[in-house]
Amino acid sequence: MENVIGQRNLKVRKEKYYLRITVKGRKYFETLHVPFTGRKAEEKEAIARMEEKLRLIRNENFSTTERKEAMDETRTKVSTATIGKLIDRYKTAAAASGIKKETVRDYINSLKVVIRTKHPGDPSNLPCTILTDDLVIAYRDSVLASRPKTKGAQDTARRTIQSTLTQARAVFAKWTYTDFKSLKLPNMDGFLRGGMVRAKIKKYELPAHHLIKKTVKAGRALRDPIDGEDEKAAALRQQLFLAFLLTYDLGLRAEEAVQCKRSWFRKDDQGIHWLGVIHREDEEYDPKTPRSIPVPALIYADLMELGCAAELLGGSVTARRNLIQRSLAPWMRSLGWTRNKCAHELRKLRGSFWRSKYGLDRAHAWLGHSSYQTTLDYYAQLPDEPEPMAVDDDLEALRKR
């Protein structure tokens, strides 16, 4: 950091002018949003902005909120990029860094969700100066206010807030700094650190044993024809059976089940495995986490016999997603499930069986979690009862062949 001759409180750091002063024991280190070029014109502008900020700092008549708004006044006058340009630059940087398209899409959508709290509609033409701690606080308060005041609902709202803000802020990850440098972004500290809430992790709890048993038996029974059913009902039942195998028996995420292809399976001397390491230029989707999952021979036989030629579930991407979200979920709720993401509950159930039977290491690897803590927090150990595992493993009896 360098001093400016004749200006005790004006500093230069990383080719920018800053104000640095201590007033009544409180330290201020504020950017003046003026680049340092060595020319007198920029120095005069920096001095003018510094004097304005000094006046505001020393003015005891300003309330905390008013002082903050006044000190940020110069910030809004600085020419900065729009949200649209920011998003375009992020997409380019993410593509160069190998970030998956699905991840980029989720992060951008989360950023737009936060912005639309105060700025409805398309935010593309809005300046980046709107990204402040006030925006974060407005988003947080709106989510909390929209949920029931019960403890459970508020805890869920806090987890939603934390998840959305984490994804929105991921757009400004450290690896993007070089790409964003030419955009002349405003100070992002408020947006990146403000408005956080403490979200207590909700530990996963297994559903009642009778519901597990009922679900597994009903899922296996989907394979069997029903007397008097028409062709359309039979096709839907078969599709539900395949979705059940992919989400429950293989523990796949919903989107992995939607995109799953025959080519993602390998059969050799080592057995049968579902491969989460597929990457081909002619495929638009890659499984979220590289991993290899062992597949029971009977499950593999059913998938190959009943699955479609390319994607196992068949139909368009929209039709396959609707199968998971609008057909599998109602089927599970008819059995007594009340949780939100039913397909993911089958994955959690499979993860619990794996963890109980094979241990944490294998469950973590097969589920494809980025950390062991995720497996510990959201995938419970089964109770020391032999019956749940018997229900899970006795495939022949449950199929009623």
Image (cartoon, helix red, strand yellow):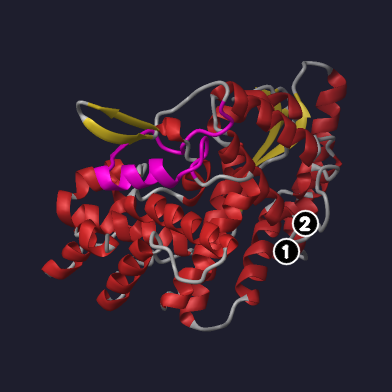
Residue pictured at 18% horizontal, 57% vertical: 356
Residue stretch rendered in magenta on the structure: 283-312
- Residue occupying the point 32% across, 61% down: 349
Between residues 234 and 381, which one lies in front from this camera angle?
234
Magenta segment includes 300: yes
Q: Quadrant of the N terminus?
A: top right
**In terms of image quadrants, where is residue 145?**
bottom right
Q: Position of residue 141 (x, y in %)?
A: 64, 69
Residue in front for this viewpoint, 287 or 141 = 287
Label 2 crowd (10 A; few <14 / some 14-19 / many >=20)? few
Q: Which residue is mark 1?
A: 65
Picture layout, residue 310 above or below residue 135: above
Measuring from the top left, give residue 241's x and y in whole percent.
Answer: 43, 57
Amino acid tagged 2: Glu
Q: Are marks 2 and 1 in contact (CB under 8 Å)?
A: yes
Q: Amino acid at mark 1?
A: Thr
Q: CA distance from mark 2 to mark 1?
A: 6 Å
Give the secondary structure at mark 2.
Answer: helix
Q: Is residue 26 visible?
A: no
